Amino acid sequence: MRKFTTLVILLFVMLACALPGSPAVAPLPTFDPNSPGTAIALTAAVAQTQTALKLPTATITPKPTHTPSITPTFTPTFIFKLSTLTPIPTYTFPPTVGTIQTPGGGNSSGDDDEAVPTKNKDEDPRKMSGKEWSCVWYGVTPPRNTVFKPGASFTVQWMLFNSGTQSWPYLGVDLVYKSGYRHIGTKIQDFTKSVPSGGEIWVRASFEAPKRAGDYQTFFYLLVGKKTFCPVAYYFTVEE
């Protein structure tokens, strides 16, 4: 019975479709496979819009601006280049025993010339005379006017500079005692070496102080052949 009823219904439907003038049956809608994704995207966009409308409006707080530091100003540096002064050469005296007393030296060339004291102690006394036989004595040790005890032994040294044009040959020039307090040893003493023109040499004489207190002096000179020149002297004191 149920099958029959179903067949009758299908028949009427087929007749209705086949009859002219009957209203056309609307076709079934076509399914779009992209429609679910489009619907989902639209739904998400609407949700974001609604969420944004409900969120509180953010207030942007401005950050503090950086205040630039003071730009250092350039200070020009001036360099002054001074000319270099040429130092004045200084003379270094040769090493000696004892103390040298430079004032009181002299330059002599005659037989009986007296030693001429140096006028300026800072001036170099070693100057050439232009004569054949001459000298300058500019150093003595111990210093002049040294005080000795009676009977004390001491040795006097003079620094002699050959200011003449002739050299002083070894064993050709002698130191000779002239007058005053007598030294120990022979009257004539040979040089220990030759001295060229412009050269220098130490000469010496040894003494024993007298036993009597007082002021004393002694004199020597140089001798070459029969020629005497370059007198030198020494002064000392004896005290009890």
Image (tube, rainbow, N blue to C red):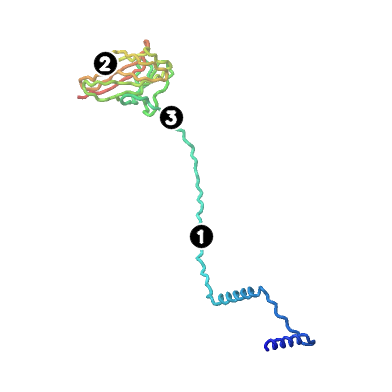
| Amino acid carrying mark 2 in the image | Ile
Q: Against 95, is 170 above or below?
A: above
Quadrant hosting residue 214: top left
Q: 135 or 142, which is in the foreground?
A: 142
Identity of the residue furthest to the top in this view? 226
Seen in the image, is 18 located left or right of residue 217?
right
The percent coordinates of residue 9 (x first, y second) are 71, 87
Seen in the image, is 124 located left or right of residue 40?
left
The percent coordinates of residue 225 (x first, y second) are 37, 10
Q: 157 or 67, which is in the foreground?
A: 67
Tell me the quadrant of the picture where the N terminus can be found. Answer: bottom right
Query: Which numbered disc covers residue 151?
Result: none
Q: Against 33, is 177 above or below?
A: above
Q: Which residue is mark 2?
A: 184
Kindly indicate whether the residue at mark 3 contacts the one at mark 1 (C-beta within 8 angstroms).
no
> Element at badge 3?
loop
> Element at badge 1?
loop
Tell me the quadrant of the picture where the C terminus can be found. Answer: top left
Who's the residue at 55% across and 76% down the image? 51
Nearer mark to the viewer, of 1 and 3: 1
